[in-house]
Image (cartoon, rainbow, N blue to C red):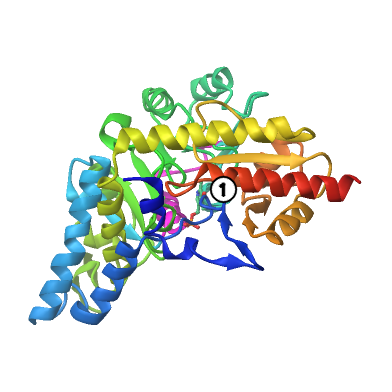
Amino acid sequence: MQLLALRAQFPALEQTLAGYPLCYLDTAATSQKPQAVLDAMASFYRDDNANVHRAAHQLSARATANYEQVRDKVQAFINAAKRQEIIFTHGTTEAINMVAWGLTEQIDHTSTILIDSAAHHANIVPWQQLAKRTGAKIIAIPLDANGRIDQPAYQALLSNGASIVAMNHVSNVMGTVNPVKEMIAQAKAAGAITLVDGAQAIAHMPVNVNTLGCDFYVFSGHKMYGPTGVGILYGQFEQLDKLSPLLTGGEMIDTVSFEMTTFNTLPNRLEAGTPAIADVIGLGAAIDFIAALPQAATKKREAELLKYLQQQLQQLGQVTLYGAHQDNLGAVAFNLADEHHQDVGILLDQQGVAIRCGHHCAMPLMQSLGIKGCCRASIGIYTSVEDIDRFVEALASVKAMLFD
Ligand code: PMP
């Protein structure tokens, strides 16, 4: 599919802001949604709306079939061994909280939790809460001078013993890609449970949890051209089955009496209450949408575009890039001289250019980089060379405005 035809499927991209055509470079925060996703959700509410798993009537049976079909799609999309290994959550944050809560009984004061220094707060705070409950120790896996995991330091930490290793697949700030397959194998050899935060990977690379070998892999629908309100917790069956449920109530039970409750089997045991049915349907449409794209060509185009973005920023001068490597995915983190990142963002916005500025929910990473915050430009399947050119031109004018 040609880029113009692809872009035409994302209605939100066709708008002007303050007289400028929208230049959307904030896909890492949330991607825009194709018409197919909007249609699937509208059609669910219009034609199939009923609660799932509950009633004996046909509408509910149809809603349940549509909902459960998405579980199969997700299973195939990430190559999970069993459909019960796919748990619908409300997003990455909820998924990590479910794991960190669920492991409480398996962790104690002798346990160590290793966390990637570039992790998003969603992959830090739930572990801190787990440590508070159990007395476990948290250790940050340091980064090297290039913003990548310091592998010798990681090996050394593992050799001291680790119960859990929580890592990024791709950094939401810099776009750096962790060698997760190797890191997982090393963590497993040290006897640790592994969780990979795939929120920023899932839209940019094929993910095969079977080959990766991780215990848990989590991501959000809204960063992969699907709706907000839905995410995935993948876990190896034996690991998921051992998690204590964070949420309890309807649907996750087998029998309830005032004396005692017994829980349902997976996946229901971890899906209490009415799920985000329409959002799950939307996620299914997003997977179909991604699967229909020419995979190799799309990946190549995105990789070239990111390299072009890095080069153009470097050529502009007085721009500091953080952890910018050729094999990064999706995002570039930068600052313009010592200008405040927020000022840069606001001035770009006045020209219709949408980027993200701040600490990007990664304050420990900001500390590792020795900065308070930065700007981030991020791309998706609909981003064009013209978008990058417009952004860099706008940044050049911001630079002139601030420096002259
Ligand atoms: N992890 C990473 C790497 C992310 O980029 C994000 C979203 N910015 C999250 C976790 C949290 O995702 P959500 O807000 O969808 O739960």
Residue 323 seen in the figure: no
Provide residue 292's location: percent of width, then percent of height.
25, 47
Dot 1 falls on a residue whose secondary structure is helix
Residue at x 56% of width, y 17% of height: 152
Q: Is residue 377 left or right of 77 when viewed as pictured?
A: right
Q: In this view, does 277 lie above or below 31?
A: below
Provide residue 327's location: percent of width, then percent of height.
50, 27
Quadrant containing the N terminus in the rendered view: top left
The quarter holding residue 273 reads: bottom left
Residue 107 located within the stretch drawn in magenta: yes
Q: Is residue 192 left or right of 57 when viewed as pictured?
A: right
Q: Residue type at mark 1?
A: Asp
Q: Give the range drawn in magenta.
A: 91-115
Residue closer to the observer: 69 or 331: 331
Q: Which residue in the structure is indicated by mark 1?
A: 387
Q: Is residue 355 left or right of 53 when viewed as pictured?
A: right
Residue closer to the observer: 168 or 204: 204
Mark 1 crowd level (few <14, some 14–19, many ≥20, 10 Å Cα)? some
Residue 272 located within the stretch drawn in magenta: no
